[in-house]
Image (spheres, rainbow, N blue to C red):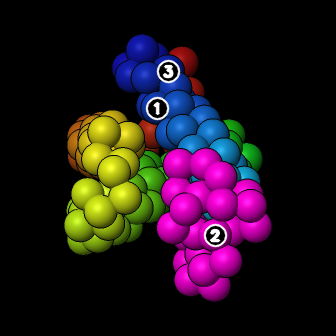
Amino acid sequence: MNRFFNFRKSLFRINAAFLLLMGGVFMVLDYVGFRMGVGLMGEALHGNVLAVGMQEAHGLAFLFGLTVLVLTVPDMRPSWHLICVGIHVLLGGSNLLYWDGAIEYGIVGPEIVVTSIHGLLVLLHLASYFLVRNEAGSRHQPA
């Protein structure tokens, strides 16, 4: 069980790193695209006040990553896996709902990668939750 505890802790850390990196980088790129028209979505975002939606989404992804890193990794309560599932269903699901935008702006390749990672994290967190949900000591490292 100790190995699975370590796997879960690593999963939370990888999850946090993914959200911090992608959310942080794209939050900056959204702003630069809006102001200067450069970057992956620069042409579409330049001067477009609707860029606020992308800025907020990526900023929230960054804050979710910070939350997972600061609160989840030390706590390790099984319910955190469900929070992470919700985060990735929201973010990956949004990518799928607005897939036409990825096609229109020529970013299908990066969207496939990012959306696949969201999907993988959903599956890993669901599996982890169902494996530890009823264990009394699942919050703390087993002896």
The CA span between labels 2 and 1 is 36 Å
Amino acid under disc 2: His
Helix, strand or loop: magenta stretch: helix
Q: Is residue 132 left or right of residue 80?
A: left
Callout in the foreground (2, 1):
2
Neighbour tally class for label 1: few under 14, some 14-19, many 20 plus, Cα within 10 Å:
some
Amino acid type, label 1: Leu
How packed is label 2: few (under 14 Cα within 10 Å), some, or many (20 or more)? many
Cβ–Cβ below 8 Å for labels 2 and 1? no
Which residue matches tag 1?
11
The picture places residue 39, in percent across and down from the top left corner, at 61, 48
The residue tagged 2 is 46
Which residues are the magenta region? 32-60
Above or below, 124 against 1 in this view is below
Q: Which mark is residue 76?
A: none
Determine whether, in the image, residue 91 is placed left or right of residue 61.
left
Judged from this view, the residue extending furthest toward the bottom is 49
Is 3 a magenta residue? Answer: no
To which quarter of the image does residue 89 belong?
bottom left
Quadrant where the image shows the C terminus = top right
Give above or below for 20 relative to 55: above
**Which image quadrant: the N terminus?**
top left
For image coordinates 37% across by 58% down, the residue present is 105
Q: Nearer the viewer, residue 102 or 20?
A: 102
Q: Residue at x 59, y 58 (%)?
A: 42
Q: Quick one: label 1 or label 3, which is nearer the N terminus?
A: 3
Residue 45 among those drawn in magenta: yes
Q: Position of 41 compared to 86: left or right?
A: right
Q: How many marks?
A: 3
Query: Identity of the amino acid at label 3?
Result: Asn
Q: Residue 6 got which mark?
A: 3
